[in-house]
Image (tube, coloured by chain):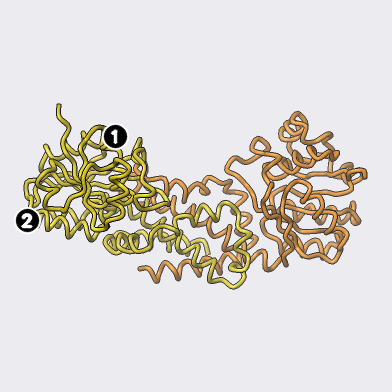
Chain colours: A orange, B yellow
Amino acid sequence: MKKPVIAVVGLGLIGGSLARALARRGHFVIGVDSAASPARAARRAGAVKSVLRLESACARAEVLFLAAPPRANIALVRRLAKIAPRLVVSDVSSVKQPIVRAARLARLDRFVGGHPMAGRERGGFAGSDADLFRGRPWLLTATPDRRALKTITALLRSIGARPVVIPAAEHDRAVAFLSHLPQLVAWGLARCAEQDPVARRRLSLAGPAFAEMTRLARSPRALWTEILELNRAEVRAAIVALRAYLSSSL
Amino acid sequence: MKKPVIAVVGLGLIGGSLARALARRGHFVIGVDSAASPARAARRAGAVKSVLRLESACARAEVLFLAAPPRANIALVRRLAKIAPRLVVSDVSSVKQPIVRAARLARLDRFVGGHPMAGRERGGFAGSDADLFRGRPWLLTATPDRRALKTITALLRSIGARPVVIPAAEHDRAVAFLSHLPQLVAWGLARCAEQDPVARRRLSLAGPAFAEMTRLARSPRALWTEILELNRAEVRAAIVALRAYLSSSL
């Protein structure tokens, strides 16, 4: 069976890793990126065969993945609804309700929300890795279009990920506790230590546990600020829970 | 020069690792432990040459390290002041003001407070490792007895640790932010996720970041509860700082 042509929009850590993994499985992968340098790097690495503008990519691809930052992905969903409303589209955003709602309102009917539970410190295409998703859960939002869901599921399985279908609201609640609050806390621990006049002078004495608990603080701040804002209601609930735990420890 | 005979009281992760490291450097190491099984394991591993009761160990040793839990170390300081008031004694407790105060009040004049900034998940003698302290800071409280400090410093350097002298109050403030608050937060993140009805059902979907941020939650709870209680005032200040950070993120 001929392998579908795939377009990946956004060739950073996640999009780049996805392109690499699909290319290795023999797909013709088209890259789309507003910046020239990741696209060039992806072509040089063999992750994508060609780099096109969004319209041309839609004309050739049978499946398109949105791997830009979350707000950009939402804007792209609205654009795709106009230029390719029947295309099977998925995304990799860390918050699912806003983009699923945008796709429904725009009538991008074959949209399947996605979120790979994988990552690493080093962002950008330079950090990408064809094995990034191997054995990792890849969350997919329940969708009315069963064929689109089946197509995406098969593609993800083929690159070694574990697709798990989950309602968007449940996803956003769970990741607030499992991913977004930990990110916020890593920043908080680093910040509090830096702002205390004694701890600040002794940062170099910290043991491996402090390094581990603040490693996430080096994650790209602009991207994470966007994620936390998009999932504001659920993140707020998680913050309230942790504040209550801390108060009970006073 | 003949290497001093060393007694190590408490053959858990830290005491066991210290005994192993000193034995490897050629010291005659005496083990003291209220339980029979770690003492047996330490002798079998060659970490200690003999296992004695505290009184007999004091009679033979030239330097004694207290590596029991923090409250037990404080009680031992008072006992040592009676049976061996001129012995060079150090400890490995994570909170320094209470034990330094106890030594001063009891007139154990050659006491040097210590705290190795090293550890690992697997506790007990079974987790011990002669290289645990290699390259790691080993904090020592300033002390009036300069010869005792010199003796301890030389011993720690010989096993590859980096001795750093720090006032006890400054130590307790710094570790509240760099070690104790991170420990509390690891428990808090795990607890909040387990108590949220949605996140709890989705724990298996968590990414590597959640595992990393909650790994410390598996640390021995009884030991840590003791540490946090002994450093209550400083830990409180650190909690207040983190709560303020979280509130500002709401």
In this view of the protein, which residue sits in the foreground, B161 or B140? Answer: B161
Label 1 secondary element: helix
Label 2 secondary element: helix
**Disc 2 designates what residue?**
B82
In this view of the protein, which residue sits in the foreground, A97 or B134? Answer: B134
Residue A124 drawn above or below residue A79: above
Closer to the eye: label 1 or 2 = 1
Amino acid type at mark 2: Lys
Quadrant where the image shows the N terminus of chain A? top right
Residue in the picture at 69% in, 42% down? A131
Label 2 crowd (10 A; few <14 / some 14-19 / many >=20)? few
Image position, residue A112 (x, y; %): 80, 59
Residue in the picture at 16% in, 53% down? B53
In this view of the protein, which residue sits in the foreground, A187 or A154? Answer: A154
Image position, residue B10 (x, y; %): 25, 52
Q: Is residue B68 visible?
A: yes
Q: Is residue A71 visible?
A: no
In the rendered view, does A89 fall on the left or right side of A187?
A: right
Image position, residue B126 (x, y; %): 38, 49
Amino acid type at mark 1: Arg
Mark earlier in primary sequence (1, 2): 1
Residue A172 sits in which quadrant? bottom right
Label 1 crowd (10 A; few <14 / some 14-19 / many >=20)? some
- Residues at marks 1 and 2 touching, judged by CB atoms closer than 8 Å: no
Residue B231 sits in which quadrant? bottom left
In this view of the protein, which residue sits in the foreground, A218 or A136? Answer: A136
Q: Could you say which disc has been placed on residue B237 in the image?
A: none
**Disc 1 designates what residue?**
B24
Quadrant where the image shows the C terminus of chain A? bottom left
Residue A109 sits in which quadrant? bottom right
